[in-house]
């Protein structure tokens, strides 16, 4: 018993010694405390402000109800995509098989006044023989194409109806990155679809219009970028703010799959309104031209040209009859302002000039070797004049999607020809749509009528009636035999 008591006492003493040593040599773990920092709590509900400045939950229902009846579904039909050629085409194997049957495409449009005028994309109605418009209440009407503008990918069509609901334009310059917007359209033929997002960026140039139009560099691209879901079929639909004002016309997406992947692009309303007004009033777009070649300033150009600014549009060259050159603007000038509006990129310059007509005067501020100079510039049209272009004066090549050039006597002699004009470039239009003509083709006759100049070609084509068959006869320099290409006006 004494032995057991001694062992127990020794055990207790050892435990006490161990515990004392631990307390002495090892610091006990401190208790965990939670500290609260004062601040504004983050709501799980998106908020906005009402007209009185009060914070209220964000609600899209009223805007959707207002906008949906103004957005229409457009179906375009081309009776044939190619006219059967009157010869064996040696280039067919290089360019692929051709389709001779009817084809259809669809998209969206926005009613912009009560009388039935509708704005959409040019690529929705381009070369269509029949255009049908379906309203949100499922009524369908045949539409007339009032005018198109490939350079902005915009078009205006009209239906014979009145008292229609419509959207009014708002100032797209006042929109801000981060602002809530809605996209309304008919993606994948799903009528009256509304999606929400924000403005992700402004002034985007993605070069999609020039790529689709073929040769040339005349497109006006300064898109509003949004993450509101836009898909095929949304083309021509509305991008609106939370007041239901028309901010832009949805036009394109950037996607590796062809479907929405987070990036949609809309033509700003300030461009749309000007194009629409021109097409309705004049029948063709009245576009003012500076006549300059420009590029956006970047760090490489700053170093290369020893520029004093890091933003703006660098002038690198001039076209013939340039209004900018005539006014005193020089190469390596950097355009930094137009009418006191800042110009940070070439896209911004193109957009600003594209809002004006021939004869308009702009105050253009350039940075020249570190010094700002403001120059008054009167815009001209493509022909170097300041007059309004009438529809009947518009070169017919633009409607056909072709640019022609005269041939000099030396070239004609080398080709053993007495007359002809050469196809300089091809874009979107009846010729590229309905035939397999290549650039460089030399047109010698139109419906067996000899062609000696571009002017003569224009005069012959102007006399052709809608639906009339046109046969272009000619040859290629690298394939010297006669070809016939046929299409209908």
Image (spheres, rainbow, N blue to C red):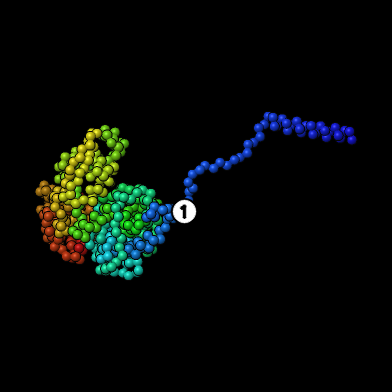
Q: Where is residue 307 in the image (x, y as percent from the top left)?
A: 26, 34
Write the residue at 78% across / 32% down. 14
Q: Position of residue 444 (x, y in %)?
A: 14, 56
| Quadrant assignment, res 481 | bottom left
Residue 447 shown left or right of residue 89 in the figure: left
Q: Position of residue 352 (x, y in %)?
A: 25, 48
Write the residue at 16% across / 46% down. 378
Judging by the rendered image, the residue that carries numbered circle 1 is 45
Q: Where is residue 336 in the image (x, y as percent from the top left)?
A: 25, 41
> Front-most of 414 and 430?
430
Please count the marks in the image.
1
| Quadrant assignment, res 318 | top left
Write the residue at 18% across / 61% down. 471
Q: Residues within 10 Å of mark 1 (few under 14, many from 20)?
A: few
Up-down relation of residue 336 to residue 51 (above or below): above
Question: Is residue 310 something one can see in this rendering?
Answer: yes
């Amino acid at each position: 018993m004494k032995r057991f008591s001694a062992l127990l006492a020794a055990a207790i003493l050892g435990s006490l010694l161990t515990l004392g040593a631990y307390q002495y040599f090892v610091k006990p773990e401190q208790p965990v405390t939670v500290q609260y920092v004062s601040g504004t709590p983050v709501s799980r509900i998106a908020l906005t402000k009402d007209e009185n400045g009060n914070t209220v939950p964000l609600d899209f229902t009223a805007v959707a109800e207002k906008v949906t009846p103004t957005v229409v579904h457009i179906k375009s039909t081309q009776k044939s995509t190619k006219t059967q050629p009157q010869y064996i085409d040696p280039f067919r194997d290089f360019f692929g098989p051709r389709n001779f049957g009817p084809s259809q495409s669809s998209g969206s449009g926005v009613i912009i006044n009560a009388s039935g005028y509708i704005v959409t994309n040019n690529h929705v109605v381009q070369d269509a023989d029949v255009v049908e418009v379906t309203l949100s209440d499922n009524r369908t009407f045949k539409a007339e194409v009032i005018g198109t503008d490939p350079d902005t990918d915009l078009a205006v069509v009209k239906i014979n109806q009145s008292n229609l609901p419509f959207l009014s334009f708002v100032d797209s310059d006042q929109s801000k990155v981060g602002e809530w917007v809605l996209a309304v359209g008919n993606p994948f033929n799903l009528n009256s679809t509304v999606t929400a997002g924000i403005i992700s960026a402004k002034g985007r140039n993605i070069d999609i219009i020039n790529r689709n139009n073929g040769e040339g560099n005349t497109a006006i691209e300064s898109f509003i970028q949004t993450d509101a879901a836009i898909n095929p079929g949304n083309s021509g639909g509305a991008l609106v703010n939370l007041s239901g004002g028309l901010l832009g016309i949805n036009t394109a997406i950037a996607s590796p799959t062809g479907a929405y992947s987070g990036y949609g692009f809309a033509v700003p309303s300030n461009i749309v309104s000007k194009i629409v007004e021109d097409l309705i009033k004049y029948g063709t777009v009245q576009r003012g031209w500076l006549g300059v070649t420009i590029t956006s300033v970047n760090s490489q150009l700053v170093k290369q040209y020893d520029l004093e600014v890091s933003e703006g549009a660098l002038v690198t060259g001039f076209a013939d009859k340039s209004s900018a050159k005539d006014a005193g603007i020089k190469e390596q000038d950097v355009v930094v302002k137009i009418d006191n509006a800042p110009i940070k990129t070439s896209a911004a310059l193109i957009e600003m000039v594209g809002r004006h007509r021939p004869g308009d005067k702009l105050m253009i501020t350039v940075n020249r070797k570190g010094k700002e100079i403001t120059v008054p510039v009167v815009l001209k049209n493509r022909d170097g004049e300041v007059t309004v272009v009438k529809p009947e004066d518009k070169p017919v090549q633009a409607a056909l999607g072709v640019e022609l050039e005269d041939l000099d006597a030396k070239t004609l002699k080398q080709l053993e020809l007495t007359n002809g004009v050469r196809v300089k470039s091809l874009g979107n239009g009846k010729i590229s749509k309905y035939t397999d003509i290549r650039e460089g083709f030399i047109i010698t006759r139109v419906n067996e009528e000899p062609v000696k100049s571009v002017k003569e070609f224009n005069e012959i084509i102007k006399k052709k009636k809608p639906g009339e068959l046109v046969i272009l006869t000619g040859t290629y320099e690298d394939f010297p035999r006669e070809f016939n290409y046929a299409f209908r006006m």
